[in-house]
């Protein structure tokens, strides 16, 4: 969103004002009813957008959750005579439980398969609604549902409208707060790559549960509001079709954009109304327009809006300053008593199918050291880092970090203990800005909880400011201070490498694992890298570095270990290693060795 | 769905003999496949929108379904079987000749498809393009044409399948979606990319559905199959025969 | 012969991937292209084989301009590219991989001729002879590299381009691969070889180019390279 206004007038407030004055402008009851429906759909889809648009979880079953919300509230009110408020609570809680169950499925399944299973779920729910007629009145459904009421006060249509408006405005506000916080950043991260997000400290399971539950609550409340609006519900209102509709709204509006659901709902609900003119061809034209939309506007309708409103980001700074200017007093590394081993890899073996990637590797990194790791391609270096990060469980052996065993922990736990890392093939999140990428590193250390974030409480605001400041100085530290607000996509290869390092530093680690940080860097950039690595060590952080640029690794390391075919064949100070015969033969070059 | 309806038109309305109808339906659906690939698949792939395929598929579905509605009307059209309607009984189980015929034709098509994929060079080329598109180009395969070919085959067979099924269910514009979902479910169960898997998945789901309809509450007959689908996928996330491509990061 | 003339590639992002690259490969010649990660060596091969479109310059083969050709057409012209990481069809057998390598020939030559050639190539590269029906996914790294070269040979190329054939291979295996490459050179094939591990490449080449950041910074005959080992080290180490 590139709109910068006087602080008072934000897009949210504009929408709020529009929503509140509509009943005074629009008198036609048919259109007013339609707008109520629009509000409900927007409410459901802003929740779904977080799950599907931001976090990329292909859930096609939200129509069913919407239906469960509707039926829960109606059953409580009509069958058991509970007051409206209880119905409301029920319509939030039951879907929340359903959302929890669905999230468990999302632990195991992704993409096409997740979509299939959530679709299956939607079909099953519809069947349940039809067949459990003792509870749900079967295919006939509920008629003459009582309108909303608080105690003795039965709400008029206009009053109900304001109830809807209230839910929409507060719901939008909550989602906006979540998106702007660390929660939103983490969602985008797992959309791009769950695995590397885990290495940055993101508890992917917990996040998925939160996402599904929140979006289900929104859908459930939406369902309840719908039931009391139309005063009639039946199973075919909540068939697979409405699930598809919600998904379409999110995708057509613009996945992962905040206002997407608004645009999408307006387009997909109001457009068919306008097409009434065409009678039988209405749906046909609708389908064509949909097709045209996805072909020409793959990022959704929001891309039209962006073209008009976004200020051009003033010039992307393509250069790397070459000077590390930031200072990092903020990083307080608890010092382990000097000289001790901070990381102990004990006799680690790992097999993949018939291939032995690591065979009894033992390696110790001393506190305050820069420890190099070299070897030919396929010798197991990256596998070793992956085992340390707990992406793989070793077949035998143990790993200790500051005397705590890592072997049975999950990747995000390992990260939260103070181990940061970068990746050989780079895993910067292209849709997040440079600043946001770096701020991801804060995920494990921040204290504000989900509640604080949802309501933008002072604690959250303070923390967010502090994180921004610190991340900015980290960016300066690696020379990226000119690119803070550019999306990471726009960075060149060398800048991306340094971004990953800044992000790893944000975890406030005691140990950083660097996987080929110099790959693809030119000579002057390699010089900068060397300086950076030394500065990091001077701050008290230990480093374990895989690198193919021999001069870099020889110049900065205190100790180098050499792997070949998963076995450690040599270890020692750099001067010894380059003269070591085995190392020369296996890695540096056979016979005519230019280095000698 | 199109297959069923086109079949109706050619065979019943225009009195074309059955065998020719199969051919014509196959060809027309193949043409549809070419158009679909050109206008609904290729542009979406180019834009690299991760879930855009859902939209284009749904959009085309809406367009086709409503066009079909317009041309053929909404009431289901009966498609008489060429066989005697009366079922014959094997050990007390009734089987209609039409069902048997459909079964055998389907098996034949599946076997032919399998042979095509594993024994002919063109079939192998299609598999190669699916496995690694760039590598396939580098050995000299025209990947663009190969992709179009796979769409033609897939759509033609779907059309023929539609024709096969409509003596049992009726022919109407509405039969597409439930059939499509079951097809997807069969593929998901058996694992994407495995023909064997789709066959077994389909068989399994069909058997489940029929058993459930007989033994359990009738309203839940297709639900049981779906519940099985969910359970299987939870145990083996890529389907029974699916290959789990472990992309670390 | 293959002539690359003043080829430049500028990516969508504005980044200059290749700048003014000129090189040539004659039949029976082994030309080596060396440089660091990110130097652009793979991009040069990609431009010749058609995976990447050049922004400027021409690619000329025996007088014919190949700019803008789709990769499968380039194969038909007689240039085969063995990509980095081999990229074989792991779900198909050794035999089928070879058959697919001859895909362009299927509509000219008879099936019998193609089968004969498969037998010949397998005999030449002894390692694979007993593994005809094995799934390519079960082969070891060295065997995969040999299979990749064999697959490329099935199309009867006049120019063979290899991208880092020694990647991830044990030194002994690398020696064997280079023996094969040398044999192919002697049989008249023109070979353009990209490598990071320099030693074997320099020993076998007739001519070499050193690349850095998308440009050619040094070129010369084999002797020049051996003398300037320090220079080479500076660019690579």
Image (cartoon, helix red, strand yellow):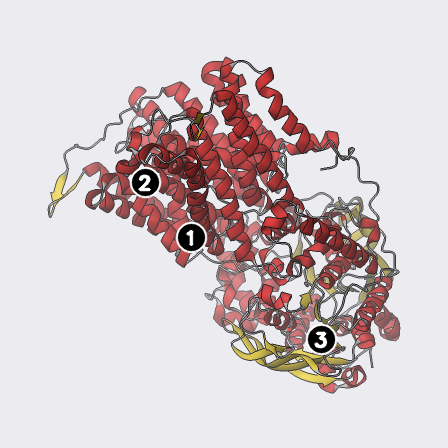
Q: Residues within 10 Å of mark 2 (few under 14, many from 20)?
A: some
Q: Residues within 10 Å of mark 3 (few under 14, many from 20)?
A: many
Residue bearing the label numbered 1 = B191
Tell me where residue A180 appears, x and y as whole percent. 67, 45
The residue tagged with tag 2: helix, strand or loop?
helix
On the picture, is A582 further left or further right than A152? right
Quarter residue A409 falls in: bottom right
Cα distance between the residues tagged 1 and 2: 27 Å
Q: Chain of mark 2?
A: A
Percent position (x, y) of residue A120? Answer: 39, 44
Q: Earlier in the sequence, mark 3 or mark 2?
A: 2
Which of the two discs, 3 and 2, sits closer to the camera?
Answer: 2
| Above or below: residue C8 compared with residue C224 | above
How far is disc 3 from disc 2 in space, using C-alphas? 60 Å
Between C221 and A536, the one lying in front of the other is: A536
Residue C161 pos. (x, y %): 69, 59
Marks 3/2 same chain:
yes
Tags 1 and 2 touching, CB below 8 Å: no
Residue topped by disc 2: A128
Host chain of mark 1: B
Say which quarter of the image contains residue A143.
top left
The numbered mark at residue A374 is 3
Q: Residue sitting at 30 percent across and 50 percent down?
A: B204
In the picture, the quarter occupied by the C terminus of chain A is bottom right
Which residue corresponds to the image point at 54% horizontal and 40% vertical from the top-left? A47
Tag on residue C131? none
Q: Is residue B201 left or right of residue A24?
A: left
The subunit letter for the residue under badge 3 reads: A
């Amino acid at each position: 969103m590139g709109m910068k206004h006087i602080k008072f007038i934000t897009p949210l407030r504009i929408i709020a004002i529009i929503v509140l004055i509509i009943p005074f402008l629009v008198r036609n009851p048919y259109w007013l009813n339609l707008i109520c429906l629009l509000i409900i759909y927007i409410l459901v889809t802003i929740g779904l957008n977080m799950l599907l648009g931001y976090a990329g979880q292909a859930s096609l079953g939200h129509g069913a959750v919407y239906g469960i919300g509707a039926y829960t509230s109606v059953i409580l009110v009509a069958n058991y005579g509970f007051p409206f408020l209880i119905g409301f609570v029920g319509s939030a809680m039951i879907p929340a439980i359903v959302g929890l169950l669905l999230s468990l499925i999302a632990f195991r399944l992704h993409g096409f398969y997740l979509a299939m299973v959530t679709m299956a779920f939607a079909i099953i729910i519809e069947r349940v609604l039809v067949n459990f007629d003792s509870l749900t009145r079967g295919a006939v459904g509920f008629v003459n549902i009582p309108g909303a009421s608080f105690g003795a006060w039965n709400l008029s249509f206009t009053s109900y409208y304001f109830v809807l408006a209230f839910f929409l405005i507060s719901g939008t506000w909550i989602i906006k707060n979540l998106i702007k916080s660390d929660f939103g950043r983490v969602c985008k991260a797992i959309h791009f790559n769950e695995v590397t997000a885990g290495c940055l400290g993101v508890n992917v399971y917990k996040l998925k549960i939160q996402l599904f539950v929140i979006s289900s609550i929104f859908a459930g409340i939406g369902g309840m509001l719908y039931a009391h609006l139309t005063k009639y519900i039946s199973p075919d209102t909540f068939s697979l079709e409405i699930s598809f509709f919600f998904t379409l709204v999110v995708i057509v509006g613009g996945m992962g954009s905040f206002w997407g659901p608004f645009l999408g709902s307006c387009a997909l609900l109001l457009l068919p109304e306008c097409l009434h003119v065409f009678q039988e061809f209405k749906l046909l034209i609708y389908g064509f327009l949909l097709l045209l939309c996805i072909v020409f506007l793959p990022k959704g309708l929001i891309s039209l809006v962006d073209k008009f409103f976004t200020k051009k980001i003033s010039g992307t700074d393509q250069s790397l300053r070459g000077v590390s200017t930031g200072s990092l007093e903020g990083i307080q590394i608890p010092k382990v008593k000097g000289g001790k081993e901070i990381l102990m890899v004990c006799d680690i073996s790992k097999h993949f199918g018939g291939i032995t990637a690591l065979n009894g590797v033992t390696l110790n990194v001393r506190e305050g050291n820069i420890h190099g790791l070299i070897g030919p391609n396929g010798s197991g270096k990256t596998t070793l880092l992956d085992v340390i990060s707990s992406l793989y469980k070793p077949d035998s052996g143990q790993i200790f970090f500051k005397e705590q065993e890592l072997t049975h922990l999950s990747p995000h736990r390992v990260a939260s203990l103070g181990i940061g890392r970068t990746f050989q093939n780079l895993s910067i999140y292209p849709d997040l800005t440079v600043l946001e990428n770096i701020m991801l590193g804060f995920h494990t250390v921040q204290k504000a909880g989900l509640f604080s974030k949802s309501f933008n409480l002072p604690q959250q605001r303070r923390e967010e400011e502090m994180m921004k400041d610190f991340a900015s100085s980290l960016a300066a530290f690696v020379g990226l201070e000119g690119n803070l607000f550019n999306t990471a996509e726009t960075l060149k290869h060398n800048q991306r490498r340094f971004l990953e390092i800044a992000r790893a530093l944000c975890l406030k680690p005691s140990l950083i694992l660097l996987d080929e940080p110099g790959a693809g860097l030119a000579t002057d950039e390699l010089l900068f890298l060397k300086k950076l690595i030394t500065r990091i060590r001077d701050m008290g952080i230990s480093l374990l570095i895989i690198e193919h640029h021999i001069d870099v690794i020889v110049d900065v390391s205190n100790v180098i270990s050499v792997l070949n075919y998963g076995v450690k064949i040599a270890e020692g100070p750099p001067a010894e290693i380059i003269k070591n015969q085995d190392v020369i033969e296996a890695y540096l070059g056979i016979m005519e060795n230019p280095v000698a | 769905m199109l297959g069923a309806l086109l079949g109706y038109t050619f065979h019943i309305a225009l009195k074309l003999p059955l065998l020719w109808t199969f051919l014509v339906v196959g060809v027309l659906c193949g043409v549809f496949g070419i158009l679909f690939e050109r206008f609904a698949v290729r542009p979406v792939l180019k834009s690299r929108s991760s879930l855009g395929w859902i939209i284009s598929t749904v959009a085309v579905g809406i367009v086709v379904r409503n066009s079909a509605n317009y041309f053929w009307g909404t009431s289901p059209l009966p498609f008489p079987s060429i066989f005697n309607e009366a079922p014959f009984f094997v050990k007390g189980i009734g089987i209609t000749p039409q069902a048997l015929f459909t079964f055998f034709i389907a098996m034949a098509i599946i076997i032919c498809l399998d042979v095509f994929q594993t024994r002919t060079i063109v079939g192998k080329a299609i598999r190669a393009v699916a496995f690694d598109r760039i590598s396939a180009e580098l050995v000299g395969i025209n990947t663009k044409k190969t992709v179009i070919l796979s769409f033609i085959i897939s759509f033609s067979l779907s059309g023929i399948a539609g024709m096969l099924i409509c003596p049992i269910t009726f022919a109407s514009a509405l039969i597409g979606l439930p059939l499509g979902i079951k097809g997807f479910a069969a593929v998901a169960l058996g694992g994407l990319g495995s023909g064997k898997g789709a066959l077994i998945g389909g068989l399994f789901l069909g058997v489940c559905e029929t058993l459930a309809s007989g033994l359990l509450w009738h309203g839940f007959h297709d639900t049981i199959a779906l519940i099985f689908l969910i359970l299987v996928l939870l145990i083996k996330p890529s389907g029974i025969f699916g290959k789990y491509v472990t992309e670390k990061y | 012969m293959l002539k690359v003339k003043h080829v430049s590639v500028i990516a969508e992002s504005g980044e200059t991937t290749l700048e003014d690259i000129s090189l040539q490969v004659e039949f029976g010649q082994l030309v080596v292209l060396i440089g660091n990660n990110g130097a652009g060596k793979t991009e040069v091969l990609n431009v010749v084989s058609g995976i990447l479109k050049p922004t400027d310059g021409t690619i000329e083969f025996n007088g014919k301009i190949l700019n803008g050709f789709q990769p499968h057409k380039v194969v038909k012209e007689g240039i085969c590219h063995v990509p980095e990481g081999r990229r074989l069809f792991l779900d198909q057998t050794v035999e089928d991989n070879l058959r697919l390598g001859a895909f362009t020939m299927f509509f000219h030559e008879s099936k019998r001729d193609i089968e004969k050639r498969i037998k010949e190539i397998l005999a030449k590269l002894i390692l694979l002879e007993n593994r005809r029906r094995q799934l390519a996914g079960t082969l070891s790294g060295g065997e995969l590299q040999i299979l990749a070269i064999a697959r490329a040979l099935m199309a009867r190329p006049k120019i063979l381009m290899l991208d880092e054939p020694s990647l991830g291979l044990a030194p002994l295996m690398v020696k064997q691969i280079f023996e094969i490459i040398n044999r192919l050179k002697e049989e008249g094939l023109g070979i353009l070889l990209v490598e990071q591990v320099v030693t074997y490449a320099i020993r076998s080449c007739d001519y070499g180019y050193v690349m850095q950041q998308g440009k050619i910074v040094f070129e010369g005959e084999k002797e020049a390279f051996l003398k300037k080992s320090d220079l080479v080290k500076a660019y690579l180490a």
